[in-house]
Image (cartoon, rainbow, N blue to C red):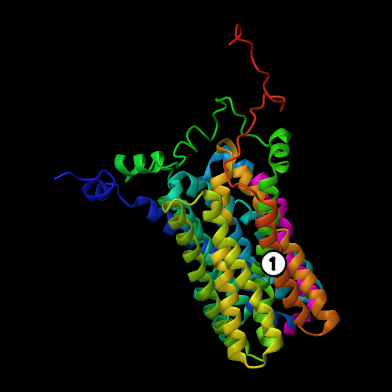
Amino acid sequence: MNINKTTGPVSAQRGKLRYTILFMLFMVTTFNYADRAILSIAGTAMKSELGFDAVTMGFIFSAFSWAYVLGQLPGGWLLDRYGSKRVYAASIFIWSLFTLLQGGVHFLGVLWAVPALFMLRFMVGLAEAPSFPANGRIVAAWFPTTERGTASAIFNSAQYFSTVLFAPLMAWITHAYGWSETFVVMGAAGLVLSMIWMRTMHSPKDHPRMTSAELAHIRDGGGLVDMDQGLGGSKSGKVNRGVKLGYLKQLLSNRMLAGVYLGQYCINTITYFFLTWFPIYLVQERGMSILKAGIVASLPAICGFLGGVLGGMISDRLIKRGFSLTWARKIPIVAGLLLSTTMILCNYVDTQWMVVGIMALAFFGKGVGALGWAVVADTSPKEIIGLTGSLFNMFGNIAGITAPIVIGYIIKETGSFEWALVYVGANALLAVISYLVIVKDIKRVELKPLDDAGQPYKKLSGAES
């Protein structure tokens, strides 16, 4: 009996170590988003105790993203220079430490609490800057192209799972013990996680449990298994891994990437509404208690998680069925984001269960459409995946600066969330337009090699070559 080389015993020998790595990425990203979202859960109690108004809360919400954006290019350089394992471990440890310290700002008094909280949130953002570019690098190294959409969607969907897992827990801690204890518990848990990361994470070629069959499957399917070989001190190789102005110019002048960057900014506007103002919307606009808001916020998050995983699976299935990479990525992105515009309908209903149902539908759609990191893994130049992912993340997370502040001003001027929801829904529509009109073919960018001066190499004549 003939056995197909891609099935049967060979498939069994191939191993599933890459899914263990993906699970680790998922858990780290879950904590990543939990630490970003603590302020939204504890925010109402903090406002009452420390006397913050909506605009002040908007600026404190945005502190994370100011640093997160500023840290993207240095974070990408560190990843390309020293590899994902060590840089990510340091990132987890530092952001968890500053999360823990936020629990003590009330000891400083009202006058100093605002600047202290702003600076601590700023440091959390700076420390988290390498996290998602590292996720993108690790997925590009550990997964072949036909599995990359699902893998990227799974780690990206951790933002919703984080809410499902931690929003009720953080709301309970805030309700039972106080808002400061929430920061302490989450920060301490993150410090432990950084130790676990160092013991479990390796590059594909260096992992002690990697089989030759699985390594071949990843490499032959387009996985960049050699990405981190020789990093940490070697200066060999023709490609300069430093942050070169010439490389940045090539990335910024690429129309496809410009459309992807704009789309990610709009998608992240939805994300940051959910991470910052959504629980407060449920308390202030819909009359829920803090505890109930924390529990209810997990329901749309569950739908966002399911939508995120489904979007990646649909995209990879389309590739296997013969669709081009371009349309396999664009179809779920466009369909999902169109669905997410339904959140505007919350302005026209009064009952709490209908609000929750509409938000669940909207975040399900946003999850389906959140394939930006799969697109980054598909399109990044092989030599500077960390830098390319950082640039993508930098533009996307400018929304973390603008969205909380804009929404804060809208609420202050209008006295309600009505136009805030219109603002968020309009961003979803703009993302659709960006992917349909600006982004053309989705394909890997080929860099022009640069010399040590950051200039393109001159072509050699036949005699010189």
Q: Nearer the viewer, residue 232 or 18?
A: 18
Specify whether 24 is left or right of 304: left
Count up the numbered dots: 1
Residue 67 magenta-drawn?
yes
Report if residue 29 is visible in the image.
yes
Residue 342 magenta-drawn?
no
Query: Of helix, strand and loop, which mostly describes the magenta segment?
Result: helix
Q: Residue furthest top?
A: 463
Specify whether 280 is left or right of 237: right
Residue name at image x 64 percent, y 66 percent: 101
Tell me the kind of residue under disc 1: Leu
Report if residue 131 is visible in the image.
no
Residue name at image x 60 percent, y 51 percent: 130
Specify whether 371 is left or right of 269: left
Residue name at image x 73 percent, y 35 percent: 245
Quick check: 138 above or below 51? Answer: above
Specify whether 324 is left or right of 389: left
Q: Quadrant of the N terminus?
A: top left
Q: Nearer the viewer, residue 342 or 160?
A: 342
Percent of width and height locating residue 71: 69, 50
Percent of width and height locating residue 41: 63, 78
Percent of width and height locating residue 426: 73, 70
Residue name at image x 66 percent, y 85 percent: 282
Quick check: 143 above or below 363? Answer: above
- Name the residue carrying label 1: 429
Q: Residues within 10 Å of mark 1 (few under 14, many from 20)?
A: some
- Quadrant of the rendered structure where residue 428 is? bottom right
Q: Residue furthest front?
A: 322
Q: Which residues fall within the magenta stretch?
A: 48-75
Q: Residue furthest right?
A: 413
